[in-house]
Amino acid sequence: MTSVPELGARARDVFRMVVEGYLESGEPVGSRTIARFGGLNLSPASIRNVMQDLEEMGLLAAPHISAGRMPTETGLRLFVDGMMQTSTLSDEERSAIESQARPGPIEDALAATSQALSGLSACAGIVLVPRAEPVLSQFAFVPLAPGRAVAVLVGADGSVENRVVELPPDVPPSVLTQAANFITARLGGLTLAEAQVRLEDEIVAGRSALDEAAQDLVGRGLAIWSQDGARRPVMIVRGAANLIDPAAAADLERVRHLLDEIEGKEEIARLLDSARGARAMKIFIGSENKLFALSGSSVIAAPYHGQDGRVVGVVGVIGPTRLNYARVVPMVDFTARTLTRLMA
């Protein structure tokens, strides 16, 4: 991929003007427009030659014959990573976000903050809610049928959850009891993630006192909750109607795909979850992620942290690739920092 230093000064100026003009208007930018308003002291013919070079590099595209140019997804990535100058939030924008991140039920604050972010960015606001990991108190396996049992988890808060778990063939009831007793006695008081780490450590160190069959059952019993939680991420979406703007009227199929993706939530939540490991902002542009290959959408997401500094969730926006990155990126960053202060 072409880097910014590889572009000459004239090419950088023309490229930046095309991108900024396109992001502002949603329309391809022509050479005459740049010649008239760009202050480059270049003729339209010279600008067209530069545009042609940028098109051959894969940074610009001409949607129609004799039309202006617009950035490709590759061009947008180059602009966002290497050329974009972010704007500064106004006091009113900061206040609009901070006023929603107030003490009370955490999901209410997250939903309100996401709504504020949606309104300011004219995108859909999205927030991945912290997963409430149950703390183990008691565990049991109840035989259901050959090869199947119900795993019963009692949480420290008194909650009771049941999951059906597949068993190896011909597992005797004594092994079910041994595995359940081990989980209750040795892993009680731990979250599921902590319990899985403890189990692996004890098996490696030879301290588990479990035979191979019981070890397998303990692993199955813990994994069923981890897998289930990953399949049911909690995501709040606000302002999806913002995605149906006048510019989208000519591209209703793209909008339909995008709304279907948001309605499903699961895949987008997984995409957001991948940002949990990031130290800072992550920007996904169009088909860089296969999820948006059809809808041509972009996601700007940033993690927010809890009291201990660990990432507990992700906040961001989703919109068309033609969104105002320079304005929205600092909004998402400020929202993430505001939610981090709320969690502290």
Image (spheres, grey):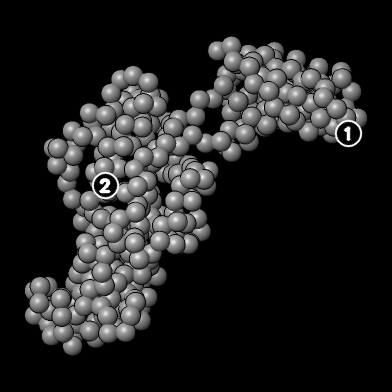
Left or right relative to 279: residue 230: right
Left or right relative to 250: residue 120: left
User: Which label number is shown at residue 169?
Assistant: 1
In this rendering, does residue 308 appear at all?
A: yes
Which quadrant of the view contains residue 325?
bottom left
Quadrant of the snapshot with the C terminus? top left
User: Which label number is shown at residue 127?
Assistant: none
Is 280 located above or below residue 218 in the figure? below
Q: Position of residue 295 (x, y in %)?
A: 44, 59
Is 324 located above or below residue 36 in the figure? above
Numbered circles on residues, count: 2
Residue contact at pointers 2 and 1, CB within 8 angstroms: no
At horizontal 36% and vertical 70% (from top left) the residue drawn is: 72
At horizontal 82% and vertical 24% (from top left) the residue drawn is: 144
Amino acid of disc 1: Pro
- Say which of marks 2 and 1 sits in front: 2
Is 276 located above or below residue 290 in the figure? above
Q: Find disc 2 in the rendering and name its residue.
A: 121
